[in-house]
Amino acid sequence: MSDQMERSLRPIYSHLDAYNYSRALKLTYVSPQCTWPITIALRAHCLERTGKKLDACRELRMLLGALPDGQWGELEEMIWLLGLGTEGEISTVGMRTSSSEQSTSSGAKSASSSSKGKGKKGKKSNATSSSSSCGKIATKPLNVETKCPLDIVHLLDMPKYIRQDKIQSSKFIANTFVAIESSESDVIDETTIATMSVTLNALGLYQTVTLLHLISIQSLIPKPNTQPSQSQREELCTVLIQGYLSLLKWIAQHPLQSESKAETIDSTRKVLRAWEDAQFAAASLVKYSGSTLYKSWCAFATMQHCKNCRLLKELLDNIKVGDNESIFTSNDGISIAEEKTKLEQKIKMLPRLAEMWMRKVCSNEKGKQEVEGEQDFPPSADDWRLFLECLDLQGKHSDALTILEEIQCGTEQQGRQIEDEDDMRNHLGSLIQFSEREKLERIVDMNVKVGNFDAAIATLSEKLLELMPDQWSYWKDLMKYSLNCHDNDFQSSFEQCSLMLERVLKKQDGLDSDGKGPRVPLRGPHLFRIHMIATGISQFSTSEITGLCEAIITYCELFAPSAICCFQDLSPFIDLLVQKSCLNGEISEDVLRLIKSTKRLREKNDPRLTAENINDKRQRREKLRAYIASIKICFETWYQLLQQIDRENESLRKSIDQSFEGFIPSGEELVKVWEHVLDLGSNPNDGGQKETLPGDDLILLGVQLLFHQIQDEDYKESEKAYIFAACILDKAISQSPYNPYLKMCALNVYMKIGAPSRAWQIFEDLQIRHIQLDSCSYFILRHLINNGLYKECIGQAGKIITLHSISANDVVKFMPKSFENGYLMKGLEMIDWQRREMKQSLQLLEAKGLIMDLAPLLSSDDAGGAKLPSPLGAMHGLCGGSADLVRAEKIARDSSNYYAAPSIQSLSIYGRTHLQSEKSNDEIWSDNRDLSLNDFEILEKTNYTIPVEELLGRAHIHAILTRIVLLVDGAKAPKKGKVAKYAKGDLIDIRSESLLQTMKNADEYLNSHNGHALSDVHVSLWKATLSLCRVMCILSAGKDSLEAQIPTNDSLAKREERCVKVLDSVRASILDGFEALKAKVSNEKKASDVDKFNFICKILAEILVPFHTTLNTTA
């Protein structure tokens, strides 16, 4: 950048640094700098910051027009999207007009408005005048006039990648621009690209950023046999680094999979190409910089390229013979068979290439510096992990073992130590070295893969278990590998593991006698005894049931006083004992022995009897822990026996309950014991938790016992018990205000007695924040909608969506820093977490559906004191009113934003069989809920299922509502008593076809899921809604299905006659729904007023309001 340019641009940068974007924007229109590419990039940045996104996008597109033909479909689709609808933005930036030559030559300035609303006038100002008025513009317009190939309804009908292809191939957007007179080198200047990247990233156009960097890289790479200067080399390396990182950002934001098989394949192809480009960028970096870090980058991209080749080949292999291959064929024009052949070749070649790179990286261990200034430092832990992964993928496990033995770990005995300040300043990449523990774990893993189980067992028992004798995963692996070593001979394996177990215990006893043992007793070895017996019973059908029972009793007596988690340790083994020894709820002798032992343990450690004799609080806490553990074990045994029978079999259930009456304490006893131990307080140093009191579990157990005992009572009696439980829990919360389990239990109780406001207050006291919004909101959302707290439900769902949006931005921000610092595996973890866990979150899907359901029911804060409730659709949502068109257009526009609630409608297009993915919902969606929060529930457990079919139903119903509003807007009125004519491709044709296809998809959903996902009320009103949509299609387009043809004798009278028949079916469906509703809320024996109210609140949001909207819109 010349001195003159710096002087001209300095005022603009000064205002940008002061966040004065309006003033900076005005300065970008001052001559002569107004036509410079860097100024146009700065102008776009200012426009984006001031909310004028369409103007910003058009400035960028005009600037990118100076580059060779690029795939700017993403940016062009954004320009088309921002201008859609009656409230779309208006912009004339860079617009090609007939007077462009005249206005350019005379230097006249034409204003560009970026106002909202149809027909509104924007404020004219020099700050918003078009960049086409500044300086010289190439005024030779293109002679091609192109009609827009898409309608707003295509936002709902087409995946984004198809829309982008159509817009780009039609040149609809590109032909509206005049070209600027700038050379390619000016546009791909390092500063200009960096400025454009900031704006593009803010707009979420990550693919455009990657394309921009790739074009810049291609132009900056020197021609063969030429050597770049030092400045050229530095500029090229900077662009290569930014290009590599921009590709990673785009990959992180790209969805992993979809409900659509075709979209999943297309997405995988694009990600594969992105890894291929990243591989090229990293290889170029190695060539022009030689840094070891960039070799690791190249190997990493190569490995990810290979993995995506495997994934794509697997997807292509799953294409069935009868499928239409044209849907899945790539845009390159090669057949699927040819593509699979190329993929197979890549799968063989790429791991070898990655291995070559990593051998170069790891060969620097002996001090071979390739870059001046880099310090002598051994390979990082991530370098070794990547190297081992390369070998593992090729099956070179023996080579990996050899390399593992040679690795020097970062310990005091071996390996180079980090000289903090000096190394941090001079070393490029990670400083973290391989740990001894990870090295040993990898040696075990590789020995297993080569089939050397003896060596794996030796490493586990002699090194890893010596290092960490309480690591439970090591003990389980020991049993598994021992069985493999002895060809599943359980007896031999049992004897081998027993010898190793005794050796570890003997060593620990020696350490304990010398006073060098751990402060907390080791549970792992003792639990392994039970695990060995349980393995024989579950896998080899041994008859050691009695031995399992005795082992459980011994472990309980040993650790119940000292370990709070004793019950959690034993829970799976108790389940196995009951499953193998009991049948149809009959208590076996072994199970009876177990529950008798729990009674003895409870009576022996009753805190009320021991409090007078023991003054030491530590000993009293041990007694209390044993007392609580005995009750939990008894409850778990009780629950597992009840699981074996039909809960509706009242006599058998009561028989089991009576069998346990003599082995459990009463609820009154539990409350009294809790009062006795309140003085103990929390003691983290003694194994307790800082947030809870040691006796809190007694209240939770007492409430569960109370609920179990009243399950056969009528609602009035049950309500008394619920109120009593609420009082006890409130008192417990007052004593232990930071215990989340007490609050969760109280929350459920208050919902049962119809006090949702108090439950919501308790939930807010839990202070669910950040990632907990995605994992811990599930136990309140359904309660809110079922109790009519719609505003609170929308607020919580909105927080979930906001979390995901912020998380996506955070990954884009921090993931590249991981790669720059050499932490490749941590960066990959961020990418996978975003693509697999967050992007596919089931809780995010539910939050979107809830917001769409409840939007019409949301009222303003001022309506709280009104005598009458706010009207339907007072603020948001479709309700059949005059504001529906504007709202429907906004819903359609927002549906392209993944982090907006209307995007759930995109799932409605996957009702077509040829597009559906063969993967189950569990494979597509990620259930991120933390269900371990409910582990305090033992005897009475709450079911928190999320039926995905129900969530997909919301996508269908809201897709129908949006389309029917758009259809009404596009319908033509009759002329002189005759139906309006339309041709194929007209607006009415496009929108009616869209609605009919959505109705067909919804019909498929209704027929396949109404048996278990929807109530009879839902089904009846669903059918009525679809019939009303059919009426609208007949009136506007003359047909009621995709396959139907318009009759030759079509007339208004004929259409009315057809509509009357359909309306008769609507009336019948409404009556069926009314009868189903009466039956649902009738005074049954166990139906409470709260249950009836919950159902009414649920159907109001889910189907009554959508049906009302459809009825009003059709009318």
Image: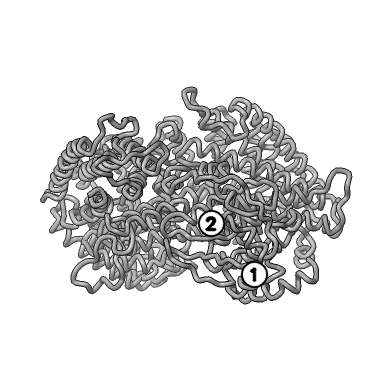
Which residue is nearer to you in this view: 573 or 703? 703
The quarter of the rendered structure image containing the N terminus is bottom right
Residue 940 in view, yes or no: yes
Question: Circle 1 sits on which residue?
Answer: 29
Observer-nearest of 963 and 728? 963
Rendering coords of residue 364 (x, y %): 82, 49
Quarter assignment of residue 423: bottom right
**Residue type indicated by callout 2:** Ala
Residue closer to the observer: 685 or 199: 199
Q: Is residue 1028 above or below residue 325?
A: below
Q: Secondary structure at mark 2?
A: helix
- The residue lying at 38 percent from left, 41 percent from top is 994
Visual colour scheme: one colour
Which residue corresponds to the image point at 52% horizontal and 35% vertical from the top-left? 494
Query: 886 above or below 649?
Result: below
> Counting residues from the N terminus, which is met first, the one under dot 2 or under dot 1?
1
Coordinates of residue 945 in the picture (x, y in percent): 34, 47
Residue 403 lies, in percent from the top left, at: 75, 41
In-image side of 909 versus 647 (left or right): right
> For residue 808, which numbered disc appears in the image?
2
